[in-house]
Image (cartoon, rainbow, N blue to C red):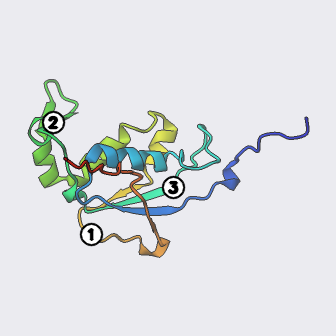
Amino acid sequence: MGSTTPMVSVKDVRHDWYVVDATNQVLGRLATRIAWVLGGKHRAGFVPYLDTGDFVIVTNADKVRLTGRKLDEKLYRRHTGYPGGLREVRAREVQVRHPERMIEDAVKGMLPKSRLGRKQIRKLKVYRGATHPHDAQKPKPLGTGVRRAARRTTEAN
């Protein structure tokens, strides 16, 4: 009975930096991968009550892709706080004006709705262009984690 599961504490956690290029990536699939890393679920020492996640830098947010007719049909809603103050904006307009918000909103919806989730979303840095001011942190490229099935070639006789 001497062996126990090692527990992760706050002093054991170190946060790495990752960079991902959003060019031609589907928004939901990209956001899922980012939320996984922000939440720390990619680590062996994941515990649900500590912030074990890493920082993620997203570049080229204006080149993210939506599938189907979502550019014209997806609505982003917000409320001004005044009576009748519900504002709706189509995804196409958001992509032109504030492409960073598309990725931030998608990732935020995948994180916990608590103090921990608010702490994790602060580690997401999204930029419209290809450059970012975090070179000093030496970010590593984040793999998309997408495995494509090998195409089968069938020969017609």
- Residue toward you, 117 or 42: 42
- CA gap between label 3 and label 1 equals 20 Å
Comes first in the chain, label 2 or label 3: 3
Q: Which residue is farthest top?
A: 83
Q: Quadrant of the N terminus?
A: top right
- CA gap between label 2 and label 3 equals 30 Å
Type of amino acid at the residue the image marks with label 3: Asp
For disc 2, the marked residue is 74
Residue 146: image x %, image y %?
38, 51
Type of amino acid at the residue the image marks with label 1: Ala
For disc 1, the marked residue is 130
Mark 3 closeness class: few <14, some 14–19, many ≥20 residues within 10 Å = many
For disc 3, the marked residue is 54
Mark 2 closeness class: few <14, some 14–19, many ≥20 residues within 10 Å = some
Q: Is residue 14 above or below residue 44?
A: below
As drawn, the label of residue 78 is none
Type of amino acid at the residue the image marks with label 2: Lys
Q: Is residue 17 above or below residue 3?
A: below
Comes first in the chain, label 3 or label 1: 3
Residue 83 left/right relative to 35: left
Look at 16% across and 51% down and name the residue there.
Answer: 95
Look at 33% across and 45% down and name the residue there.
Answer: 29
Residue 83: image x %, image y %?
16, 24
